[in-house]
Amino acid sequence: MYKNLVTVAKVSAIALSLALASGCATVKKEDLDAVRATADAAKAAAAQAQSTADAAKASADQANTCCTQTNEKIDRMFKKSMNK
């Protein structure tokens, strides 16, 4: 999803560049506003994707910590049973 948003942002930037390169006199304010709106929407979607990715990473880190603790506990129990 994030790659799609980056692609949309790149396409928007290219479209804006082409519009500006073709001459300011031929660029309509409405066209420029539409490109800005698309770029703003892409930036907002990218920020949301980053937020979701950060939350997923935090959740994965928490699960990994739990798994590590469980493995350590099992190891201690195994060592204790081998000493008996």
Image: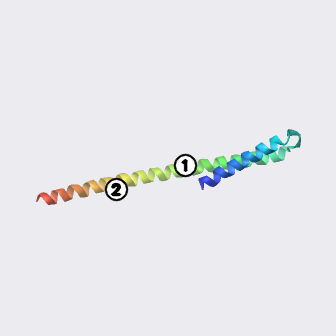
**Who's the residue at 60% across and 56% down the image?**
1
| 55 left or right, relative to 1 | left
Q: Earlier in the sequence, mark 1 or mark 2?
A: 1
Residue at the outermost left position: 84
**Who's the residue at 86% across and 45% down the image?**
28
Spatial CA distance of label 1 from label 2 is 24 Å
Q: Is residue 20 above or below residue 8?
A: above
**Who's the residue at 71% across and 50% down the image?**
11
Residue located beneath label 2 in the image? 67
- Residue 36 image offset from top left, x and y in percent: 75, 45
Q: Are marks 1 and 2 in contact (CB under 8 Å)?
A: no
Residue located beneath label 1 in the image? 51
Can you see residue 41?
A: no
Can you see residue 5?
A: yes
Circle 1 Cα neighbour tier, 10 Å, few/some/many (<14 / 14–19 / ≥20): few
| 62 left or right, relative to 7 | left
Circle 2 Cα neighbour tier, 10 Å, few/some/many (<14 / 14–19 / ≥20): few
- Residue 61 image offset from top left, x and y in percent: 41, 51
Q: Secondary structure at mark 2?
A: helix
| 36 left or right, relative to 7 | right
- Residue 65 image offset from top left, x and y in percent: 36, 51
**Who's the residue at 61% across and 49% down the image?**
46
- Total count of labels: 2
Q: Secondary structure at mark 1?
A: helix
- Residue 34 image offset from top left, x and y in percent: 78, 48
Q: Amino acid at mark 1?
A: Ser
Residue at the outermost right position: 25
